[in-house]
Amino acid sequence: MEAAVGAPEPETTERERMIAGRTYRSTDPELTAGRAATKRVLHEYNATHPDDEERRMELLRGLLGSVGEHVWIEPPFRCDYGAQISLGSMVFANYDLAVLDCAPVTIGDKVLFGPRVTLATASHPVDFQQRVGDMFEYAQPITIEDGAWLGAHVVVGPGVTIGARSVIGAGSIVTRDIPADVVAVGNPCRVVRPITEDDREAYLRAYGAAG
């Protein structure tokens, strides 16, 4: 039987299945080789001299899908493949950012990451046979919109979008979408309040205006 006109081509490799958001096996030789190549680049990145900003940016631009201007990722940094990560401009990530980019990870402009943030697009079946016997895995995209701030030790799970300018409290486990302009905390992470003009005024009262 011929395929219907206009029907999508079936995914023929584990990599294509992974990118398409379908079940795949991470033990596939092509995927294993891709992760190994990424580890070699990251080994060099994480071992760069603290003053060698130019080399770090060169390595990032060669590894990641796209990188904006004025990006700073403090070593050590880890990811699975790199090619599915898109960074906007003026992104800052503190120590130990880990990105499991088996699906696309899109990070907007002016996003801040505290130490040891994990963005995990990949997951496994709950069923033991599927998870261990069949070695199945799947992945869903993560999006961090412009101006969001994720505190230390935040974990973001598969398929999550964090809205623009929102603040995620330290240690939170984010399993569902978070809207824009809110403070959200906890495990599981939940919205606790909106961000308002009062937050600006409270900060100025507590700490004063910058000189």
Image (cartoon, rainbow, N blue to C red):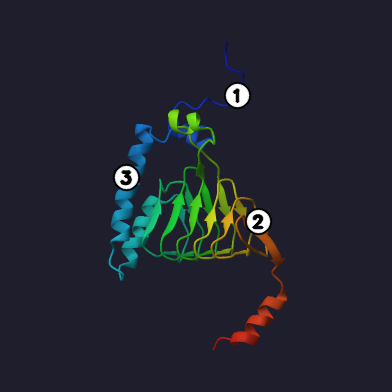
Q: Is residue 205 above or below residue 171?
A: below
Residue designated by label 1: 7
What is the quadrant of the N terminus in the image?
top right
Which label sits on residue 178?
Answer: 2
Amino acid type for the residue under numbered disc 1: Ala
Q: Position of residue 27 (x, y in %)?
A: 38, 34
Disc nearest the viewer among 3 and 1: 3
How crowded pointer 2 is (Cα within 10 Å; few <14, some 14-19, many 20+) is rated as many
Give me the residue at 33% from left, 54% from top.
42
Classify mark 2: helix, strand or loop. Answer: loop
What separation in Å lies between label 3 and label 2 (alpha carbons)? Answer: 34 Å
Give me the residue at 44% from left, 28% from top.
133
Classify mark 1: helix, strand or loop. Answer: loop
What is the quadrant of the C terminus in the image?
bottom right
Which label sits on residue 37?
Answer: 3
Q: Which of the two labelled residues, at mark 2 and mark 1, occupies the earlier sequence position?
A: 1
Amino acid type for the residue under numbered disc 2: Ile
